[in-house]
Image: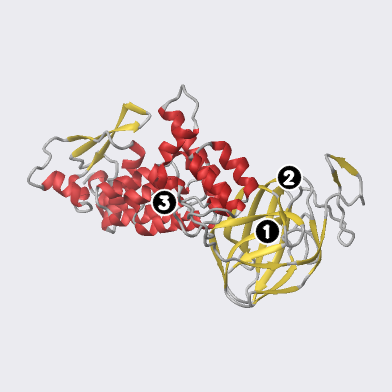
Amino acid sequence: MPMEEIWQTKLPTLVDRTTSIFNSELLSDVKFVVPVSTAESESKKVIPAHKFVLAISSPVFFAMFYGQMAETKDSVDLPDCEYESLLELFRFLYSDKVNLSGSNVMQVLYLANKYMVPSLLDKCTEYLCNNLTTSNVFCILTHAQKFGGKSLEDRCWEVIERRTEEAVTSDEFVTVERSVVESVVKREVLNVKEVELFKAVDRWATKVCEKEIPIAPSDGEEKRRILGDEIVKAIRFPLMSEEVFMSEVLNSHILALNEVEDMIKHYRGVLQSPLPFKKGARGKIDYIRCNRFQKFNAPCSGSDGWLGAGYYSVTVPSSGGSWSYNGAAADSVNFTVNKPIMLHGVQHFGSVGGNYTVSTEVKDTTHNSCLGKESGTYTSEKEDRKNYYGFDVLFDRPVSLEANKQYTLMSVIEGPLSWYGAEGQMSAESGGVQFSFSDSDDDSNSTSVTNGQFPVIIFN
């Protein structure tokens, strides 16, 4: 018997055998014709398939091929999907495996929902949860509300609530539906200043105006019409200072004259009637912050050479290192905790008006395995309580840390010279949790227990 006729003998399991005929003409009894991509709808590709394999995996395919209105043609046109995504759906039906990526996961999610394959839906949801960021959270939220189920939607709202300012200032926020904007401003828990929320809503309304009437400049009256009372009155203008209200809100011309007059009376303390806007502060995620250092040094110490642009080279006497950054050297420190915690992020030192590109990760020191990583560009703000400049790097997903196990915190930073900490503590307590710090072998930029980066560990 020819070798090609006994291929089954070399494949011991059913999955092995069905995988071997995936995307193959062998025994195929139906072909699917699909666009290469939505951008190239005229360009088509063909995927050979097997009715029986598809039907035992999907009730929709069962009805298509074996139901009362069964398809009799040997070719099926599917204009609503792309070749790569349909191929991944079929790969999963044949092999229980799927190759998900940022470019195909949304379409695969759509197809898993359309063809009623819940196990693939779960795979897509897991992938999206693991790759959720503030830059894509609104795109994923939209798909989650349509296809992804409550767990993915809840995870999206968790990210939006924890990292509101980053989320609403992302490029995707101005592309969302009005219903999403309304849902955001009505949340009771948001980590953002109310003026920044208003500015994000204003940008969204401006973008909608530009789409609807591209040749006319957007004005306050038109933006108010688009936003409506539900959105405008959910913004808590009384939480803003009078100065901020007059400079940011008044100039937008979104509020009606009587609303502006009421707000001015509110600031003057002469308002007789209730405001149409909520006064109560929104709830915020409660983080605990553990401080590493007892002293903080500014970059303009004058102890070393002038580098221009208002900065001096800062040298720490005990280590001989300098807190300049080149995007290659790593600042790193090891630590343990005496109780299990959820690590949300770490504060970094910055400088007045300084912008920094940062890649931060936390590792299991023993196994050298990455537990969480976050990258982005950050702007320094003044830390009111300690009077230095810095910025928080928060992980998209909190990292679970065990008690009495060593972890490594490491950041690669690019940007101007920064403040730095001195007289660091070997041990520090906050919120009933004891942190113990030690020097890291991964450090190549002079950070240590006593000096350098990472003024605050953020956890709960």
Horizontal and vertical percent position of residue 382: 72, 53
> Which one is in front in this view, the residue at disc 2 or the one at disc 1?
2
> Which one is in front in this view, the residue at disc 3 or the one at disc 1?
3
Colour mapping: secondary structure
Q: Which residue has dot 2 on it? A: 353
Q: Residue at x 49, y 43 (%)?
A: 258
The secondary structure type at the circle numbered 2 is loop
Q: Is residue 392 visible?
A: yes
Question: How many discs mark residues in the rendered view?
Answer: 3
Residue 377 horizontal side relative to residue 10, left or right: right
Q: At label 3, which amino acid type do we have?
A: Ser
Q: CA distance from mark 2 to mark 1?
A: 16 Å
Q: At label 1, which amino acid type do we have?
A: Gln
Residue 64 horizontal side relative to residue 170, left or right: left
The disc, 2 or 1, on the residue closer to the chain's N-terminal end is: 1
Foreground of the two, 159 or 199 = 199
Above or below: residue 229 compared with residue 404:
above
Q: CA distance from mark 3 to mark 1?
A: 30 Å
Horizontal and vertical percent position of residue 255: 50, 41
Q: Which residue has dot 3 on it? A: 183
Which numbered disc covers residue 347? 1
Q: At label 2, which amino acid type do we have?
A: Gly
Dividing the picture into quadrants, the one containing residue 336 is bottom right
Asked if labels 1 and 3 touch by Cβ distance under 8 angstroms, the answer is: no
> Which one is in front in this view, the residue at disc 2 or the one at disc 3?
3
Horizontal and vertical percent position of residue 168: 52, 46
Dividing the picture into quadrants, the one containing residue 363 is bottom right
The disc, 3 or 1, on the residue closer to the chain's N-terminal end is: 3
